[in-house]
Amino acid sequence: MGSQNESLLGGEFSSVYNQRIPKKKKSWIMFVFESLNFLLVGGLLFYVYSETNASPVGKKYSHGPSKKNIIFMVTDGMGPASLSLARSFKQQRDNLSIDDILELDHHLIGSSRTRSSDSLITDSAAGATAFACGLKSYNGAIGVNPDKIPCGTILEALKLQGYFTGLVVTTRITDATPASFSAHVDSRSQEDLIAEQQLGDSPLNRVVDLIIGGGRCHFLPPSIEGGCRADERNLVEEAQAQGWSYVESRTDFDYLQNGDNVTLPLLGLVAEKDIPYDIDRNASQYPSLAEQAKVALTALSKASEDSDQGFFLMIEGSRIDHAGHDNDPAAQVREVLAFDDAFKQVLEFIDETDTETIVISTSDHETGGLATAKQVDPAYPQYLWYPEVLLNSTHSGEYLTKKILDYANKDDVQQFSDFISKEILEKDMGILDYTEEELSLVKNADKSNLSYALNNLISIRSQTGWSTHGHSAVDVNIYAYTNSKEIRKQLLQGTANHGLLGNHENTEIGSFLERLTGVDLRNVTELIKDIRHAPSASELAERSFEEGSLEKRHHLRDL
Ligand SMILES: *[C@@H]1O[C@H](CO)[C@@H](O)[C@H](O)[C@H]1NC(C)=O
Ligand SMILES: *[C@@H]1O[C@H](CO)[C@@H](O)[C@H](O)[C@H]1NC(C)=O
Ligand SMILES: *[C@@H]1O[C@H](CO)[C@@H](O)[C@H](O)[C@H]1NC(C)=O
Ligand SMILES: *[C@@H]1O[C@H](CO)[C@@H](O)[C@H](O)[C@H]1NC(C)=O
Ligand SMILES: *[C@@H]1O[C@H](CO)[C@@H](O)[C@H](O)[C@H]1NC(C)=O
Ligand SMILES: *[C@@H]1O[C@H](CO)[C@@H](O)[C@H](O)[C@H]1NC(C)=O
Ligand SMILES: [Zn+2]
């Protein structure tokens, strides 16, 4: 048999992969392909061009061509399917037409390949280090290269150039994404050290001017309520003594007056650990991501008003990832929509400012292997999924798990059963058609699998599919917007010309920012080479959490 037959019969993957197309056929196929490509790219170019032309073209930049604001947004764990899910959910919820799409959808320019140096599936630490340092590193690496040598970050480089800098997140500020821009440690679990570096314990001294997020825990000693440091240092008091202003409650946050009443540096730690999922968030206790972003944008632009340089701001929708780990579709759609609101806030800022400003928004990776389809029956499936099921649920699996674990009357079998059926399933989740079997599954679940059991009820009914509780290797989207013709020109080039149009390695996003701002990260690498980044003996000990414990599951969930 000839080789053609072998490959038709399955053959080797590589032979099929490398198979040459006969010449005549190739040119025809290539013609169609190239025409499609031309139309697509041309359409995109035209689209982005006309979109951005809608705003301040020809506007005079009052601070000369070099002054720029750079806004970098991260949707942690958001893959393309999250967009489809959230978009259909919103259309259903608000009775919108099919062309009423998300704000992000209007600004798609490309996609990013996300692998790390040591795995085809990255974690958030290596993912953010790729953006911050423009290089691939290993899973767990925070601002260090594969040899554990600290690498200069775009935030540090811009601070050295005189930019004001800020970090806005919904998880702990010491978590992987914000840490990778503002700290250098061998392992993401060194959060105590990350907190110290974020406040200025670095050869560069302080590089962050504004912090708003969760994560008081690693700034406070264990002797103080909500503190979880391994030592007795109170970094909040130390920071205040060094001139940081500090906010930790909603009331404090409201004093910031949307950013008009901010004294930099600002340390805003508005939650002990994570800020609650948007679906659970009590607005009189916690700000939204859009509110946080608004404060940061106003404060940083006011601070840089009379400066030759603008600001660098990183904003992360951190917990899209957590909802993916939890396989919680009801929580995830609200996280994506909350991020979309923040993105909108950023666009409004860009349209109003006189300073050349760019926003780039992308994900470090996808989480959950989400699909907007799930086969729930052995028979050939119907082509359907049901966003309205997500609408009925009013809390995350995380929140309801805590509510169930906190329920006091578990010993009264009948009362507990009623509590699960009436209160949790019917009232909180809007599920009326649960079976006896499902009810008993929830009643018998323990800490380790209760949230999975609850979320699964929703995934099955909405026909939302998940393939993992971890991350996946699927490419993620890149979105961008700018008010500057010059920046737009650079942005809308392909890889060969160092732009971000089309498909890219995640490191190219970091390199793009480096080139755009004219900094050289290697110079910063030289300046920070002596920063302490290895874990201490006690940090190593602290990290050896026990196999199978809840602590471990929660720890893993965050990765
Ligand atoms: C939804 O929108 C359509 C078209 O705008 C309108 O006809 C319909 O009454 C709306 N339905 C509800 C429930 O508001
Ligand atoms: C501005 O912030 C300070 C605290 O830093 C607060 O005392 C003051 O009331 C705030 N002003 C307004 C108008 O909220
Ligand atoms: C939200 O928080 C406020 C202030 O702490 C509280 O009074 C209120 O009961 C909370 N609302 C809900 C629904 O928990
Ligand atoms: C959602 O809740 C409504 C009212 O409680 C109920 O009628 C409906 O069946 C629920 N939908 C789903 C998909 O469970
Ligand atoms: C959850 O864990 C418990 C205890 O290990 C086990 O009995 C139960 O079958 C598990 N439930 C699910 C839904 O996995
Ligand atoms: C980096 O450092 C080199 C050597 O000190 C210097 O010549 C160069 O101007 C620096 N580049 C930038 C962009 O700061
Ligand atoms: Zn994750």
Image (cartoon, rainbow, N blue to C red):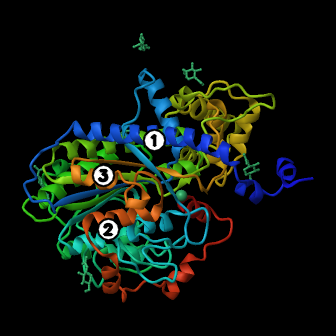
Q: Position of residue 198 (x, y in %)?
A: 32, 73
Total numbered labels placed on residues in the image = 3
Q: Position of residue 432 (x, y in %)?
A: 63, 24
**Dot 2 lies on which element?**
helix
Nearest-to-viewer mark from 1 and 2: 1
Sequence-wise first label, 3 or 1: 1
Nearest-to-viewer mark from 2 and 3: 2
Q: Position of residue 459 (x, y in %)?
A: 63, 37
The residue depicted at 35 percent of the width and 50 percent of the height is: 492
Label 3: few (<14), some (14–19) or many (≥20) C-alpha neighbours in 10 Å = many
The reply to whether the residue tagged 2 has its Cβ within 8 angstroms of ligand 6 is no
Residue type for callout 3: Val
Horizontal side of residue 49 vs 555, given as left or right: left
In the picture of the structure, the residue carrying the numbered disc 3 is 359
Q: Residue furthest right?
A: 1
In the picture of the structure, the residue carrying the numbered disc 2 is 514
The residue depicted at 64 percent of the width and 26 percent of the height is: 384
Separation of disc 3 and disc 1 at Cα?
Answer: 26 Å
Q: Residue furthest front?
A: 24
Sequence-wise first label, 2 or 3: 3
Residue type for callout 2: Glu
Sequence-wise first label, 1 or 2: 1
Residue type for callout 1: Phe
Quadrant of the frame with the C terminus:
bottom right
In the picture of the structure, the residue carrying the numbered disc 1 is 38
Query: Is residue 315 visible in the rendered structure shown here?
Result: yes
Of the pair 103 and 490, the residue shown nearer to us:
490
